[in-house]
Amino acid sequence: MKANVPTRKKIKLNWFKSKCNLNIEREIKIQYTAINVSYNKISWDVIIRYILVKQGGMKEIPVNSPMTLYKDNLPFLFLSTAGTIGNKIISEDLIDDDIKVDDDVVNINEGIEKVTYEDARDPKEHIEVRTRLDNVTRKITIENKLNDDINLLFDFKQTKDIVFVSSEPEPSEIEEPNYKYQINIPSEQKNSIILEIKAKITTRVTKIKPEFLKKGKQ
Amino acid sequence: MLIDPRVKSIVIFNEGGGVVKREIKLTLQAGNNYFQIQNIPASFDPNSAEIKLRYLKPEDKTQISLQQTITSLPDRKNINQLIEREKSAAQNIISHSIDFTREMRENISDICEASSYRTYADMIGIFDFIINSSRESEILVEIIYFTNDVRISWNSTLHVNVDKSGKTAEIEGFLVVDNQTGFSYENVDLGFAIYQIPKESSLNLLPNQEQRAYNSNIRGDQDIQQLRKKTQRLKNLML
């Protein structure tokens, strides 16, 4: 490509023009901790990314290149590229502000507490470890505020403290530790998932050993 | 002899800098022929400077040879002082002026703007070479060097026209070349590469930092791994 590059100037050159398929990927990633699993309400973000599958030869596009999406010749979204894989041009991840996710606690069945002891740094003390397994039911409601139907992937990831028990509906795909659900939500509609999980709740308190406690006045 | 070879091509890196290729046909006298290349920016990398001889006749291969190249960069401290002086002089012109007519205004603004943008990289470096020839002849000389100047870079910008179905689109890609250096390139072959010239500090400091980390045993293995250089392969878009 021949061009003039004058000093202290910016030049713009045509590079390529081609047709492409536009895929929109939406994803909700949920992972609880022993602390937030019992929260009354949690809000999660829906991550959206645009994938352009270009026709013709591949083009290597630098990361963070500005990308503007036009509809009816009007710009409606400004974003950047996150990378290219073959002939796929992948946009950066954005939070979809038009999809609302509310995660509410439905029920908590506290398990029986088991007390064990661990050594503390001070020989006169020990750590009292109280462990119980709670059954927690949570309802995740996803609201589509867009004018179009959407498909999204709901991805629950279990951890060593929070374990999946069951769900309504059943997961579409289980790839432990991930439980995935393909969800379709029509325009201006809601869809819910009820998750039943087992949470290992542990509390630790350092206490003086009984034999070192001062005896009360007799 | 002073020569000003034409810039034939430049491969620009997206993170700044590039590889410049210049070319000139030279007439050689018998003996040593000394050439000084003009318009070599001080941002050029003397280690990457290379001269390639393209022989016009097959018999020249044995009779013409490159004896040596001589490269040098201007002293950074002195040049920076000079630039600062120029900048303050330009400021004085503006602050002491009473009235500019239209023509004067443009001329003075050009001078002041040029001096305010000027940096060490806009100064002139030295790149000379000596060709040894056993007879009078002609030769094509290719000069190649890296410029380590982040003020010349490129980026791409994409326009995506989504159709009514929302399933397909037309994508238009543009290349935007930003040249804030003091050098112009006329009618050159442009190449674009995704590459970042390794920074001097990261190259020099890395082994010491690593060594210190191993010796003092303060950092974990993970931290040490982060200090290591990562591979960076140049991706050519078009040449």
Image (cartoon, grey):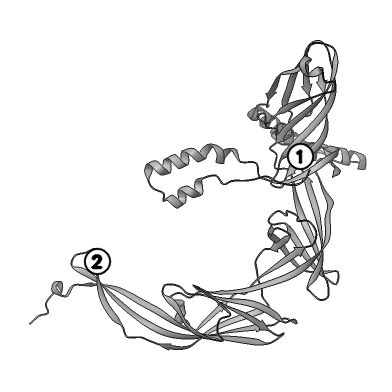
Q: Which residue is mark 1?
A: B181
* Nearest-to-viewer mark from 2 and 1: 2
As drawn, which residue projects farthest toward the left? Answer: A218
Can you tell which quarter of the image residue B97 is in?
top right
The chain under label 2 reads: A
Residue B166 as seen in the image, left or right of residue B194? right
The amino acid beneath tag 2 is Ala
Discs 2 and 1 lie in a common subunit: no
Quadrant in which the C terminus of chain A appears: bottom left
Q: Is residue B142 above or below residue A160?
A: above
User: Measuring 21% from the left and 69% from the top, which residue is drawn there?
Assistant: A125
The location of residue A63, given as percent across then percent down, is: 68, 55
Which disc is residue A120 wearing?
A: 2
As drawn, which residue projects farthest toward the front? Answer: B58
In this view of the protein, can residue B40 be seen by the observer? no
The location of residue B96, given as percent across then percent down, is: 79, 38
The location of residue A217, given as percent across then percent down, is: 9, 80
Q: Nearer the viewer, residue B167 or A212?
A: B167
User: Measuring 75% from the left and 51% from the top, which residue is drawn there?
Assistant: B155
User: Measuring 86% from the left and 69% from the top, which residue is drawn there?
Assistant: A73
Per the model, the C-alpha gap separating discs 2 and 1 is 66 Å
